[in-house]
Amino acid sequence: MTLKLISKTRDTFRLGIKKRVQAATGKLTSRVMQTEVGKRLTNPASATSLKNRGVEWLYLIVLYLLVAGVINAIGNSGQAGINLNPIVANPNAQNVTETIIIMFGYIVGSLGAYALYLSGRQTIRARSAEMFFVGGIALIAIAMTVGYYILSVK
């Protein structure tokens, strides 16, 4: 009898937690739906543009992976001791960590170039243009620093 009581108490406790979690996620979902992003994502007309953007993002990710040398990293992954350091000192070898670091540098540099592009557009205010320009220069400087650091280690 006590086992049934303990089991019933445990089940009641689990149902209480489940109801609380469902209530919290329901509140969060309703808040997200009220925002502009939620409205845009739930709009049936924007679903096609979301699919197109998804293909564009996938293309960019694959492009950056290939440029960063993921094939070279996969080819060198069988070598003994190649994954001991984040950057391999051999100019002919590359590991996965180094590929991710290089890809980060390429993405940061690309974002900097895009910020410089936005700073030159005539449709934004002068203050925003200055911020985009300074941010773009800073991002490109960070990307170049990462790239030159990798070259100096190799």
Image: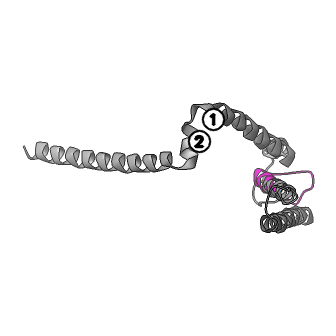
Q: Nearer the viewer, residue 90 or 12?
A: 12
Answer with the quarter of the image where residue 42 lies: top right
Q: Earlier in the sequence, mark 2 or mark 1?
A: 2
Q: Disc number at residue 46?
A: 1
Which is nearer the eye, 69 or 135? 135
Q: How busy is the neighbourhood of tag 1: few (under 14 within 10 Å), some, or many (20 plus)?
A: few
Give the CA separation, mark 2 to mark 1: 7 Å
Q: Residue at x 46, y 50 (%)?
A: 31
Q: Residue at x 11, y 46 (%)?
A: 5
Name above or below for residue 3 compared with residue 109: above
- The quarter of the picture where residue 98 lies is bottom right
Discs 2, 1 touching: Cβ within 8 Å: yes
Q: Which residue is mark 2?
A: 40
Given the image, on which type of amino acid does mark 1 rest? Ser
- Where in the figure is residue 8, as x and y percent of width and height? 16, 44
Q: Is residue 111 left or right of residue 18?
A: right
Give coordinates of residue 77: x percent, y percent.
Answer: 78, 46
Position of 14 compared to 60: left or right?
Answer: left
Secondary element at image label 2: helix
Amino acid bearing label 2: Arg
Magenta highlight range = 88-103
- How many discs mark residues in the rendered view? 2
User: How busy is the neighbourhood of tag 2: few (under 14 within 10 Å), some, or many (20 plus)?
Assistant: some
